[in-house]
Amino acid sequence: MLKLESIAWRPQDGEEILKGINLTVAEGRLTVITGPNGGGKTSLAKIIAGLQTPTAGKIWLDGQEITDLDITQRSRMGIGYAFQQPVRFKGLTVRSLLEIAAGGDLCNGEICQLLGQVGLCTQDYIDREVNASLSGGEIKRIEIATVLAKKNARLLIFDEPEAGIDLWSFTGLIDAFEQLKAGRNCSLLIISHQERILEIADEIVVIADGKVRTQGSREEVLPALLENEKTGRCPLHKEVACNE
Amino acid sequence: MNNITQKFLEIVSDYKGSFDGVAYNIREDGGCAGRQSTEHIKIESKPDGPGLVITIDPHTKGETVYIPACVTKSNINDLVYNDFYVGEGADVVIVAGCGVHADGDAEARHNGIHRFFLGKGSHVLYKEKHVGTGSGKGLRRIDPVTDMVLEEDAVMEMDTIQIRGVDRTTRSTTGVLKARAKLIIHERLMTDGEERALTDFNVVMEGEDSKVDLISRSVARGSSYQEYHSKITGNNRCTGHSECDAILVGNGKVNASPELYAGHLDAELIHEAAIGKIAGEQILKLKTLGLTQEEAEEKIIQGFLR
């Protein structure tokens, strides 16, 4: 359903971050992208959502090329994106943000369900402004809820959803991802370093130095990643480069 | 009353065809278009000039009084002095919106000077909406003055909003707070085109443990210009907070100059201010939720002025 072909990206006056990424995300699958910091994972997610424009390459969603479509058009085609650093809004309430995400009014029960999935109590949050009064963990959970609220979802992208989320809510979040995978006709693309998220993946993609280093099923990729972590070896089997 | 007044009342006073069973006075082009008192709220003309005396009995609870004023044509300069005496322990809502309509080359103007005297332990929610309409070249002008004196333990919540279409406004608000009195002001202001708005707040906390919370949010669009001045004075153990945020759109300009004066060692005064265009990240986030650039800007502004 999502296909990336030779995606490259170089920021203005910067070095090339993505160097010819080829990737396919199949229908209804949960794919986790992992890899070292600075490897290009967030840049890739932003390119898929339309927040950044690739310097080369093509993107297809459901067989339609979307490389030249803007953020709004991609969202309307069903791409959702949860920011790694969520945005704050003075004045916009949690309810209004979720309703924008859902594309229409939501009843209290629907909001309760969405916030419950990210471990927040509706009564405490529904009329709160999405502003600086919320903690990092609270705003992160609301950010995730905005993506869960998307009704026409085809591909939902979450950039490090675990960051700032406490253990209890994290368990709920894992459940939410599993329910999404089982119950909705969409694919999930999650950028994460978290073992528990890797454990629910159908596919794992390791990106480093702007390239896909490994791609395969969880069973194929995860054992090696975990083993490398235990032994302290470079997950990319590039000890020399990592020790530099 | 004429059709323009009727439309204004719907906008500024949530008017649904009548004010049944409540106290009200409708001012239209300097005259009275309707008045009603209730058992506990008396509305009387001032004997010595234009305006009203509104007297709310002590311990009156749950009543609303409407005092809207409408200027429905050019070449009217309406001046009115309304005094509100709120009895001890009363808890009421006062709605005092204003609309000005200019259909000719001359100015249409309303100057509403409202004085509030809140008795001990009383509570007032004061709602004020301002709007300008009409295609005439004459300026639509509203210059409200709100002066408040809050006795011990009194609470005043002032919710004031200028929606659109007011070419010139000078908004002056003062407050004097006695012991444990609390004043909450929430101002929202939108200007566009060549409109100009000047806001001036001056609150003095005289009483021990008095408190003021002043929040002003504004949007300056087009080539409009806004000036914001506020002064909070703490002359006792007290708490004062003011927050002035403005969003600039197009060539809008805002000049904000807040001032704090602590005249007592235990006065705790805080001011926060932020002026700038809509953050690019906010637009991006709403675009990822399916909105266009224009829709995202509107949502952000709507929420900001909520």
Image (cartoon, coloured by chain):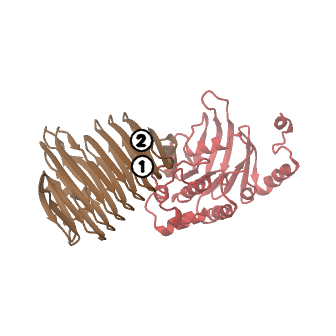
Chain colours: A red, B brown
Q: Position of residue B89 (x, y in %)?
A: 34, 68
Labels 1 and 2 share a subunit: yes
Q: Secondary structure at mark 1?
A: helix
**Residue at 13% in and 46% down:** B73
**Residue at 37% in and 61% down:** B154
Between B213 and B78, the residue placed more toward the observer is B213
Q: Is residue A82 left or right of residue A225?
A: left
Please state which amino acid type lies under the numbered disc 1: Phe
Which mark sits nearer the N-terminus, 1 or 2? 2
Quickly name the residue at label 2.
B247
Between B132 and B153, the residue placed more toward the observer is B153
Q: Quadrant of the C terminus of chain A?
A: top right
Quickly name the residue at label 1.
B304
Instruction: Give the CA separation, mark 1 to mark 2.
Output: 9 Å
Q: Secondary structure at mark 2?
A: strand
Please state which amino acid type lies under the numbered disc 2: Ile
- Can residue B1 be seen here? The reply is no
Q: Position of residue A57 (x, y in %)?
A: 62, 37
Disc 1 crowd, CA 10 A, few/some/many (<14, 14-19, 20+): many
Chain that bears disc 2: B
Q: Position of residue B210 (x, y in %)?
A: 43, 55
**Please, is residue B11 above or below residue B278 in the view?**
below
Q: Is residue B75 left or right of residue A236?
A: left
User: Tag count in the figure?
Assistant: 2
**Please, is residue B2 above or below residue A4 in the view?**
below
- Can residue B173 be seen here? The reply is yes
Furthest toward the top, the residue is: A13
